[in-house]
Amino acid sequence: MKAERSLAWRTTESGFDCNDGVRLFYRAWQPQSPRQDGPQRALVFLHRGHEHSGRIQPLVEQFGYTQDWAFAWDARGHGYSPGERGDAPSFEALVEDFDTFIAHIATTYGFAPENILVVANSVGAVIAATWLHDYAPRVRGVIMAAAAFDINLYVPLAKPALRFARRFKPELFVTSYIRPGMLTHSAQEAAAYAADPLIAKAISACVLLGLADTAKRIVQDAAAIDTPVLMLSAGKDYVVKEGPQQDFYQRLSSPLKRYVHLPDAFHALFYEQDISVALAASREFIEQCFERAPLAPSHYLNADRDSHSARQYAALQAGRSCGPVAKAWFGMQRVMLGMMGPVSNGMKIGLRHGFDSGASLDYVYRNQAGGRFLFGGMMDRGYLDAVGWRGIRLRKRQLQQMLGERIAAHRGDAPLRILDVAAGSGRYVLETIKRFQDREIEVTLRDFTQHNLDEARVLADQLQLRAKIDYHLRDAFNAGSYRAEEGEYDIVIVSGLYELFSENAPVAASLQGIVSVLRAGGHLIYTGQPWHPQLDMIALTLTSHQGKPWQMRPRPQAEMDGLVAHAGCRKIATRIGLEGIFTVSLARKPAAPAAVD
């Protein structure tokens, strides 16, 4: 039976380039008799930690979708992919690699994301879950087997000890304590695991701790995920804990989700003595996923009123998001900020203009601490080093990189036209076009505040830019501010704006206006804030540009992308910021159809 199924695919080996230039290995299984009753479909398998794509071959056969493609990679540091065995620059790099892998599959083999379903095991399942949360792909569904949200390290205080040890030895590795017989009841599978020379027995502490930190964030904010998910858990799992898997499942917003507990199974669910229940549940779930259409972009228009994030925001507004002790602590911080804040240059600007204002943002971008007396400078450095502000500066670098790539890719004799609908001081745009003084570029900077536009003029003069720059006092949410007579733009930027407003109707109206002045084939660069770890502190301590408490509703990436898609653009890339707080995304307006003679 296995031999007959093996003949159903033609197996090929290839590679793809990651964003940092590293080329990773992968396998593809092409069906000999492809599906004729609809679009081509693909199953993408993510191997467990320590393993590689060579061990996926039996799963492709056992799943038995002989009319569908299958793919599996060797994560960096595994199998035939390069890198120190069990290592990566970070756990986030593995997630970014996977996003690149899926994009490669879609582009190279012609698969729409909604015709892809992911099957992931253990560490691979955490990669998949993080990918769903941070990148919000429109894949048809994900199967997560024994997701490693919390690994059993057994040694007391193992994680704090590893963090401390890495201060002295950053390249520290941890050897797995798990014996093959603890992974499966099958003696044959245990022997194959033990004899496989490509299985890495160690994992870097960097990746292990990054996995733990990221998993905690993803489980906490799992409600942001609405992709169909099947979770398979092992009742006798010596490797990972089941509690976080259950928490993740309960919090999911997925309209289709299932949790299947296999009481006698060890960790390697798909390599067990009996996998019939896991396979049956997986096949049933796959059929259910492909029977129902993905959520339409219009689904997200009402998410500001009917979603988990909307309920969280309502609790924040009603003062029910934290307990009395936390409120008292943040209240004391607010009083101290009012008394001591003016000696810090950054806090002084925030108190005067709002901590979310363009003026405050520009100060954070400059990242030059200052204040009255030595104490003021020290306070300012602590202020500028807050996780949110560090994330803002990374967002700026990512935005500038993305903008620079689009400017460099522009072709044609006509000037490249760029619009920033809420530019603030325009620093990220103006500093970027400084590097393209040899290009013909026209820039329009718009903002709601004249002070910000005046600051932008000063900065443009300081940079001695050749580009033609226009400054308009406009409201980005006013549909009348997008005027066809001003011409179409090749690139439109909306950065740090929508994150400040919880309602979706004005955001959708703004996006409709933007798309109306974006040329066919043009690009939209937009930012998002899918989550934030300090919502209560910010709401109870800081004030916004409107002079009110700075209360934020993080907009999940799927929701933000859905609003962009509803306006008429298709997202093609996302870059994730520090701790997943901020994102920078690129979308494209469809090209105009070719004229017919």
Image (spheres, rainbow, N blue to C red):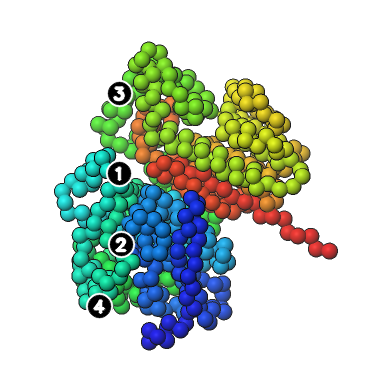
On-image quarter of the N terminus: bottom left
Q: Earlier in the sequence, mark 1 or mark 3?
A: 1
| For discs 1 and 4, the disc positioned in front in the rendered view | 1
Q: Which residue is mark 3?
A: 332
Disc 1 element:
loop
Q: Amino acid at mark 1?
A: Pro
Q: Tell me the CA gap for discs 2 and 3.
A: 51 Å
Question: Residue 170, labelled with which disc?
Answer: 1
Residue 78 percent location from the top left of the image? 36, 61
Residue on which the image places disc 2: 200
For the point 39% across and 49% down, the residue is 89
Dot 4 corresponds to which residue? Answer: 188
Q: Distance from label 2 to label 4 (Cα)?
A: 19 Å
The C terminus lies in which quarter of the figure? bottom right
Q: Nearer the viewer, mark 2 or mark 3?
A: 2
Give the structural element (helix, strand or loop) at label 4.
helix
